[in-house]
Amino acid sequence: MESIARYLMLGGIILFLIGGGVYLAAKFGLPLGRLPGDIRIEGENGSFYFPVATSILVSVVLTIVVNLIIRFWKK
């Protein structure tokens, strides 16, 4: 049971850090969600939004960060 609690606490800390990063990105005016390549279709009855470019950028950044953490963890 202790191991589950540790994983939940670690997950909470990671989500807190990601949320803080998104908050700071918005404060500094980074256009996450409004990049060229994000799909936005607005009609009379509704709208559709799919952030393709933002998803790719976030994926690349998280891949680099996780690889660096794993590399330093093994040493």
Image: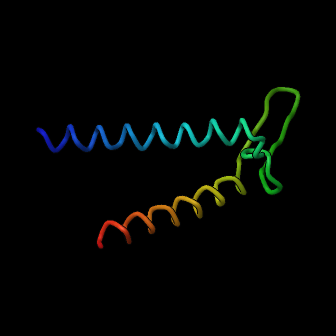
Across and down, in percent, residue 7 comes to 26, 44
Image height of 35 relative to 11, above or below: below
**Quarter assignment of residue 34:** top right
Residue name at image x 61 percent, y 55 percent: 58
Image height of 40 relative to 64, above or below: above
Residue name at image x 75 percent, y 39 percent: 48
Q: Is residue 59 left or right of residue 14?
A: right
The N terminus appears in which quarter of the rendering? top left
Across and down, in percent, residue 26 comes to 71, 37
Residue name at image x 78 percent, y 46 percent: 31
Q: Is residue 39 left or right of residue 66?
A: right
- Judging depth in this view, the residue of 57 and 38 nearest the camera is 57
- How many labels were placed on the picture? 0
In the rendered image, the residue lying farthest to the right is 44
The colour scheme used here is rainbow
Residue name at image x 44 percent, y 68 percent: 67
**Quarter assignment of residue 10:** top left
Image height of 74 relative to 14, above or below: below
Across and down, in percent, residue 75 comes to 30, 73
- Judging depth in this view, the residue of 41 and 26 nearest the camera is 26
**Quarter assignment of residue 69:** bottom left
Across and down, in percent, residue 65 comes to 50, 62
- Judging depth in this view, the residue of 66 and 54 nearest the camera is 66
In the rendered image, the residue lying farthest to the left is 1
Q: Is residue 2 left or right of residue 46?
A: left
